Structures are given as structure tokens and as C-alpha cells.
Amino acid sequence: MLLGPSLQHLSFPEVVGAFFTTGVLVMGLGMTGVVRRAMAAIPMPIVMAMVAAIFLRFGTDVVDASTSAPAIALPMVIVIALLTAVPALGKRMPPVLGTLLIGLVMVVATGQFRFEADGRVPTQPVFTAPEFTLAAQLELLVPLAMTVLVVQNGQGIAVLRQAEHDPSINSFAVASGAFSIVNASVGAVSACVTGPTNVLLTASGQKSSGSTRRLSPTACSRWSSPCSPRCSRGSCSPPRRPSCWPWAASP
């Protein structure tokens, strides 16, 4: 939302320059401790309302998919309801994972999975030299920093608090800033502690097993990152492509 209009009058190196300065600013704010004090001033109901707004579309899409692709959507709804309603089953198979697996099975079983195995694997990151201009900094620096600290990290922190965790807000800011600088070196967007990811990590299982739940998606991310060309192709294979994926447009 921020970068689309900006790229119409700013060059990509100028935008990358804003990514770099955003990472430095976010990391600096985290080191000073000001982020925790700022987040404490934001009422939690407002933050949770932002989280709810993000997930609203997921809920409405379930209803839509139940009519447009019932052979795939309805078994997924049944499985997540069953695993959630019966704790004994949910302990053996996490509801989110079980729903994902049955969805994959139904996509393949109905013959709607198409995979084009092109794209270089592993992918080769390309260093993008930043260009620091006043126009790009004035337009993007503050909005990007607010998006990282309040919109994205704020959602993740709120989700973790709802799950009875005590996240270190300043540490999150420092980590987001540091990894944003790394991401910027290859022209990628800022790093965030997002709400949806933390919802998946805390949706099921015991609180004491949090370390195991965190390691699993971390391992998957480390595998999928160098294989991103093929993973992107695979994500476009199901018949219904979310419009928010720019690479998922039908030919």
C-alpha cells in the first residue's frame, strides 16, 4: 500500500534507501527503550481491533470458498471444527496443521493442483545499491517505521499477550530494525513481528511447547527462502488465488 504509489515517481534504489534508514531508525528506537513506552500509551482494544480487521477477510473468505469450491473448503471446515471441539484429537494433531493437510489432500484429489517447476533454485539474492534522497526519506521513512512498530509489531505483541506471553517490545524493535537492514540489502521490505504468524503459532498446543512451535516454522522458512521461485509457483497452483498476491494473477 505504501510502496505502490511511491514507485510511480521514485526509483527502486530510492525506495531501498528508505528501507535502510527505516531499519536504522527502528533499531535505534528499540535501543533507547522508547518503543515500550509508546506502545503502553496505545489502548489494547485499538490494537486488537486492528488485528480483527486483518483477519476479517479470512473469515468471510471461508464462507465464499464454501460455495465456490465446496469440495476443498467444506472438508477443511469440518476438520478444524472437529479438532478444536475434541481436545483429545487436537492434542495429537494441531487444528491448523490438520486443516492445512486436508486442504492439500483435497486440492490434489480433485485434480486442481498444477505445478510449474521453473525458476532458479536456489534463488540468488541480488544486492541493490541504495540511493538516499530527501524526497524518498520524507515520504517513506515515518510511514514505514510506524507500519513496522505499530501496525505490524503491535499486532504481534497483542496476539502474544492474549496468549499469556510477555513479549519484550524493545527487543522486538531492535530485531526488526536489524533484520530490516539485512533485507534492504537485497531490496526486500522491512522485517516485522506480524499478527497472523503469531496467531498460527499460539492457536493450539500448550504454552510450554512454544519453543517447538517456533522452531518448526523457522525451519520451513529457512527452506522456503532459497527455494522461493518454486514455492511461489506452488502457492499459485490452487484454483482460487487470493487477490492480495501480485504474482498470482491468472494468465
Image (tube, helix red, strand yellow):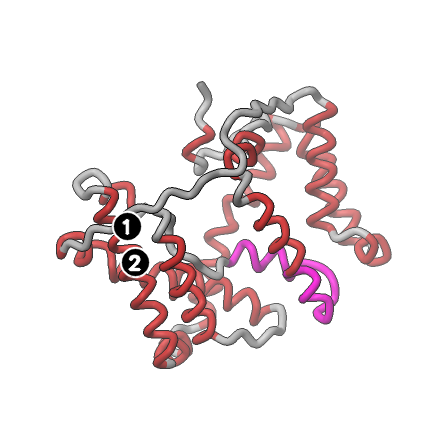
Is 233 left, or right, of 10 in this rendering? right
Count of labels shown? 2
Furthest residue toward left: 134
Mark 2: few/some/many CA within 10 Å (<14, 14-19, 20+): many
Q: Where does residue 229 sit, x and y in percent of width and height?
A: 50, 34
* In magenta segment, residue 209: yes
Q: Quadrant of the C terminus?
A: top left
Name the disc covering residue 73, or none.
Answer: none
Q: Horizontal placement of 22 versus 108: left or right?
A: left
Q: Position of residue 173 (x, y in %)?
A: 41, 69
Q: Which residue is mark 1?
A: 16
Secondary structure of residue under mark 2: helix
Identify the residue at the far right of this view.
88
Q: Is residue 9 above or below residue 160?
A: above
Q: Which residues are magenta?
A: 195-214
Q: Choose between 206 and 213: the one closer to the eye.
A: 213
Asked if disc 2 and disc 1 are in contact, CB closer than 8 Å, the reply is yes
Which residue is disc 2 drawn over?
A: 20
The structure residue drawn at horizontal position 53% and vertical position 42%, both measured from the top left corner, is 226
What is the quadrant of residue 149 in the picture?
bottom left
**Label 2 to label 1: alpha-carbon separation:** 6 Å
Please name the residue shown 73% across and 71% down the image: 208
SS state under label 1: helix
- x and y, in percent, of residue 35 in the image: 38, 75
Residue depicted at 51% across the width and 48% down the height: 56
Label 1 is placed on what type of residue? Val
| Residue closest to the eye, 69 or 102 | 102
**Depicted 65 relative to depicted 130: above or below:** above
Residue sitting at x 67%, y 55%: 216
Most foreground residue, 248 or 10: 10
Task: Tell me: 3 left or right of 125.
Answer: left
Q: Position of residue 117 (x, y in %)?
A: 57, 25
